[in-house]
Amino acid sequence: MTTLESPGPTVGVVGGGQLGRMLAEAASPLGVDVIVLDPTPDCPAAGVSRDQLVGDFDDEARIQELAERSDVLTFEIELADQDALERVREETGVPVHPDPATLRTIHDKLVQKRELEAAGVPVPPFRAVEDVADVRAAIDDYGASVMLKARTGGYDGRGNVPVESKADAEAALEAVAGPAMVESFVDFEREISVIAAKGYGETATFPVGENVHEDEILRETVVPARSSDAVLERAREVAEDVLEVMAGRGIYGIELFETTGGEILLNEIAPRPHNSGHWTIEGVRTSQFEQHVRAVLGWPLGSTALRAPTVSTNLLADVEAPRPAALANVERIFETPTASLHWYGKREARPLRKMGHVTVTADGDETREELLERARGLRDAVTFESE
Amino acid sequence: MTTLESPGPTVGVVGGGQLGRMLAEAASPLGVDVIVLDPTPDCPAAGVSRDQLVGDFDDEARIQELAERSDVLTFEIELADQDALERVREETGVPVHPDPATLRTIHDKLVQKRELEAAGVPVPPFRAVEDVADVRAAIDDYGASVMLKARTGGYDGRGNVPVESKADAEAALEAVAGPAMVESFVDFEREISVIAAKGYGETATFPVGENVHEDEILRETVVPARSSDAVLERAREVAEDVLEVMAGRGIYGIELFETTGGEILLNEIAPRPHNSGHWTIEGVRTSQFEQHVRAVLGWPLGSTALRAPTVSTNLLADVEAPRPAALANVERIFETPTASLHWYGKREARPLRKMGHVTVTADGDETREELLERARGLRDAVTFESE
């Protein structure tokens, strides 16, 4: 039986960026408090949380303090230290969701791929590489160019280096500078993602999104993805298979390739609410953030039914150098009945930094192409400068 | 031109109850900070606000401190002290919305009715009364029983005493114990309300809600109200006329009677987000809380188009005496795809205290009667006790 109390449960979140902020926004209507741990004083989540502890993501003393004030711990960033989380869990008895073991699996992309492949999840051909000879051999074996990936620490395409020819292998290895793996290039039709929730004895997947990247940074998500029904169904199946492998409750952002042949292959997994799921705030009744709160508390999951076709587009700081954040010309967004603006409250705009996002839902019979164009138009009208 | 900055503007709110909490929830996605002033330490809004100042609603030093940390002041409770707000505005130059003059008008129900009547807003027959003879004369003149009302301080029906016969007049006056007025009983078909926003050079009204009261406490709101289109249109017109009289920007909760003859008469006005507008969180794209934030900041108002017929029902503490708050058996609400639970985080359950609400939106072609029944069923399944 689920009982709400006052004070309600407190969720301790390692990380207090925009994901932490949107988690706190979603937790409040349920009577749930959020405390965040983040190294940046006055982080984006601070103003909407019960409290912020200032400390690094691997500051075990601070994580311990967070646990002592929380009923459950979670994280909104993969940099959360899995060993520290495990020790704190042991020490305090406070559960951690997802399980730190999941974080460890995902943290090393090679381990991640191996475990998923072993569980029957379809993945592109991949292998560990130690030196130039290994990279060149992979190009030979895969019969094509490859993607060289840092096994740990990559984010938003950082640590991913395409290797188009054997001559590029040495420079690519130097750029990655650490343990690496290669993956065969996937000839994909589109990149898609499934936001999936693992709850207490149940799972739920959100409608499949189609992701538009540029310079390996997510620009837009279109929902539903413009794929066939069979492909969408297969993507959800793969996501369910991925959840089987993951330990611990919460939201998982599961990035997939739809190949030109209509196959689904796993790209990467984030064990947390994901940028490609921000559209759920307006697009479904239960957002990925509310779903995460419900999941980590072991409460029943909510409905993931689509309200209407939806597009979200990131507001990436269009600045040449760091400067105080300001977003001008937002009237068009404010005045559009089907658009919602989210501004994360980051103090500093840096080149291509994610400062906010805009979500637009379909107006009547609008096609997804028209919807995407409209979202881009709203996004392109704002400027990163004060008047 | 509207420009968002980081840190964004801060809205200082006098009052930090559930309305303050829902204001803070709605402010965060816009990058707006909220600071609340409330006498109860750790008030409902505290956990989701930047900060809480602990002080009474008329503590001028604290209001001054709030203003010094805010870009605009507003209030979520009529007990906010209008004189103190005016002096602080004068002292600090920080604007106050709605205008404290509006609060003064509304604070005294007699003054409220007189000003509205003078502006052409339809009101039931009313007059000031000083003694038993006045009350008896009113019963004679109106040819019916009357409602005796305390001119100030009434809330949720407190301070309203029906006078069914001349013999009751004396006891009623004693019960009201202070300056009073009488109003002719209205023979109404239903009680309805319009949540209306006065923005910067624009206004917006939400779809008309039908309010079900019991013991003068709001139980449910059904949207759209089950009235004819002509009556709904007339209600919106009256609401627009009311906004003309009100000074300052913000949300106004405008309670109306629909008479058995299909006329609209004004009942009461609350110069703030209103309990009968909580359904807007799920029922429209821009909730009354987001709209209030936009209005007081002078930002463009958002869309008030109805997503689907919607019912909200209050969770009133069903307890005999004060006790720690706990709400059991919430599974059915959590598992219903069209239902959302809001739990205000109040520490103590007291008899009939508003502890939260449930909003249910129509499933397919569901009628409003079916929707209302379903909402009541979900509400009646929860219990105010821990397991």
Image (cartoon, coloured by chain):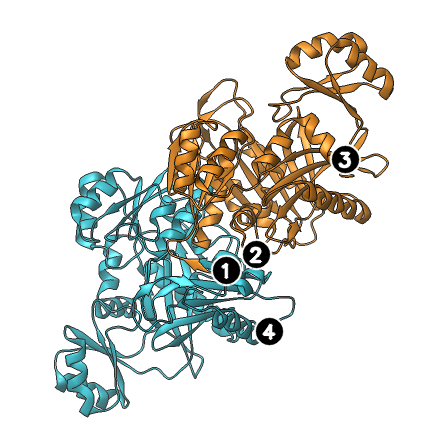
Chain colours: A cyan, B orange
Question: x%, y% of residue B46?
Answer: 40, 37
Distance Cα–Cα, label 3 vs label 1: 36 Å
What kind of residue is marked 4?
A: Thr
| Circles 2 and 1 in contact, beta carbons < 8 Å | yes
Q: Nearer the viewer, residue B362 or B303?
A: B303
- Residue B118: x and y, percent? 76, 35
The three-letter amino acid code for the residue at tag 1 is Thr
Report how far apart the C-alphas of labels 4 and 1 lie in the structure: 30 Å
Q: Give the numbered dot on residue B300.
A: 2
Task: Report the residue marked by disc 1.
Answer: B2
What's the distance in space between the residues labelled 3 and 2, CA to CA?
30 Å
Q: Residue at x 37, y 84 (%)?
A: A187
Q: Please give the residue where the numbered disc 3 appears in the rendered image.
A: B118
Tell me how far mark 4 sits from mark 2, CA to CA: 27 Å
Disc 4 chain ID: A
- The percent position of residue A233, horizontal first and vertical second, equals 48, 69
**Figure quadrant of residue A346:** bottom left
> Residue B77 has which mark?
none
* Of the image marks 3 and 2, the number of the one nearer the N terminus: 3
Q: Chain of mark 3?
A: B
The quadrant in which the C terminus of chain B is found is top left
